[in-house]
Amino acid sequence: MKITVKKGALRDSTTDAIVVVSFEDEPKPEGTIRDVDAACDGQISSLITNGIIRGKLYETSVVTTGGVIGPSVVIVLGLGKKGDFSRDKLRGGFSKAAQKVRELNLKTFATSINDGHAGLSLEVTVRTVVEGVMLGLYEFTPFKTVDRVEMKTVNEFVIMGTKLPTVKKIRTMADKGEKISRAVYYTRDLVATPSNEMTPTILAQRAEDVASKRNIKVDILNDAAMKKLGMNALLGVSRGSSEAPKMIVMEYRGADTTESPIVLVGKGITFDSGGISIKPSAGMEDMKDDMAGGAAVIGILASAADLGLPVNVIGVIPATENLPGGSAYKPGDVLKSMSGKTVEVISTDAEGRLILIDAFTYAGRYNPAALIDLATLTGACVIALGDLIVGMMGNDNELKNRIREASEATGERVWELPLPEEYEELIKSDVADYKNVGGRSAGAITAGIFLSKFIGDYPWVHLDIAGPALLSKSGPYIPKGATGIGVRLIVELLENWVKRK
Ligand code: BES
Ligand code: MN
Ligand code: ZN
């Protein structure tokens, strides 16, 4: 689908459909909707008067025009009460409107934006609308062959503005929204791709592909290189699989080379069977998503480069499968990590933290201004926060606050879990420095504490995305399946970082 920006009035649009918005507590059509209503002989206002169009949140009423204007339908999108309005509802609303256009099998649609909607700036409104439309229309279809012929797709979304300066601003923001949404698409595709088609080697190729089209350098460490570096925690996890592990390192330098980078570490388990501590088979198919953190990091770097953000960002993605096998690592094994610290393996299913710690030690070489890791780390976090909320832990309040601020803008919700000192003894081992499991209670937190032991003296935040990475039920603008969680959040953080430098 392409996004176009045009100067002109919405009633003169040449698209198949146009979208206007209405609020529940603003019954009289104003502005654009009044103009469109007048062109349609007052049909919309009479539907409002008769209580058929009520402006309820996500209501999408289809009004046929009978050819009195170019578009064959007007979709009146309800956005609820003005007082309850939010950026996330605007995203959800435009997603619903776009999905309605697709359901009607129409190919092109338009809306007009001349000021911000209900308290949002023009810029924020445009970006949010574009995100809603694009994120909501996402579909993962590469493996569908039978239904493909009947598939409906929308080809074009047009945003119209009446004044030239406004049109210029709209173009800039629509472009940003589109670039970020494309990065989210890319990440969603990586996560949705089944593990037989998304091995560590293929993931590394995708990272190279992303980098080769942009101002990004990429370095892929193979097992020999990792062995030299002493990454025995990661290598231990990979032993059960015949797929070669990869440490993917991406570098985007948008600022002065002397400036310390923000380092992003993303868990890249392309399939997590649990290993010898094998998982129950029910739902195991979802464990193809265990590289969602790594996929997000690739999307974030792509986006940072596409937007040309003046900031240095390094992505480090430890990638391997976690399988049982004749040479698999076993409970009771002790692994010596790259940091020199040793870990007793209690469960081979607590593999994420093992590959992350070697990535952290490697990341330390970059002298990070901040380190953020994204990982589908614990089922315990899903139990605690469900699939709408990311678990956040870390050692630096300012960084956490910056993430909270970004989260409010993007709607990717985060909630902090503490890292209490008293729980540190839960991961003490009798035979090694630490053990990789702290027991059943506070599972997300003990995982966070384990990670903290391998973090240097820099601000660090751990984002446990186990719940939000893959949804079994669609949200207003996130179709079920892979979500691309974290991409918009960290891109927003990077954009704000630049502003505050
Ligand atoms: N990848 C899983 C965590 C996960 C669970 C992600 C559900 C997405 C949905 C992780 O590697 C794992 O298996 N964690 C174990 C840790 C336990 C053995 C301490 C878990 O949460 O059960
Ligand atoms: Mn696991
Ligand atoms: Zn895992």
Image: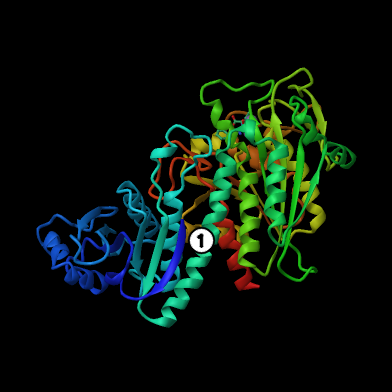
Q: Is residue 177 left or right of residue 474?
A: right
Q: Position of residue 196 (x, y in %)?
A: 64, 30
Which residue is more in the foreground, 49 or 275? 49
Q: Is residue 314 left or right of residue 174?
A: right
Q: Residue furthest left?
A: 50
Q: Quadrant of the C terminus?
A: bottom right
The amino acid marked with disc number 1 is Glu
Q: Residue furthest top?
A: 326
Mark 1, residue position: 178
User: For disc 1, does the CB lie below 8 Å from ligand 1?
Assistant: no
Q: Say which residue appears at 64% left-offset and 67% top-offset.
A: 309
Mark 1: give few (<14), some (14-19) or many (20+) Cα within 10 Å.
some
Q: Is residue 48 left or right of residue 219?
A: left
* SS state under label 1: helix
Position of residue 166 relative to residue 291, above or below, is below
Q: Position of residue 275 (x, y in %)?
A: 68, 24
Q: How many marks?
A: 1
Examine the rendering and report whether any part of residue 442 can be seen. Answer: no
Q: Position of residue 199 (x, y in %)?
A: 68, 35
Which residue is more in the foreground, 385 or 111? 111
Q: Say which residue appears at 66% left-offset and 28% top-offset.
A: 349
Which residue is more in the foreground, 213 or 350? 213
Q: Say which residue appears at 68% left-offset and 67% top-offset.
A: 311
Q: Say which residue appears at 74% left-offset and 33% top-offset.
A: 428
**Quarter location, residue 497:** bottom right
Which residue is more in the foreground, 293 or 162? 162
Q: Is residue 429 left or right of residue 444?
A: right
On the rendering, which quadrant does ligand 2 occupy?
top right
**Quarter location, residue 160:** bottom left
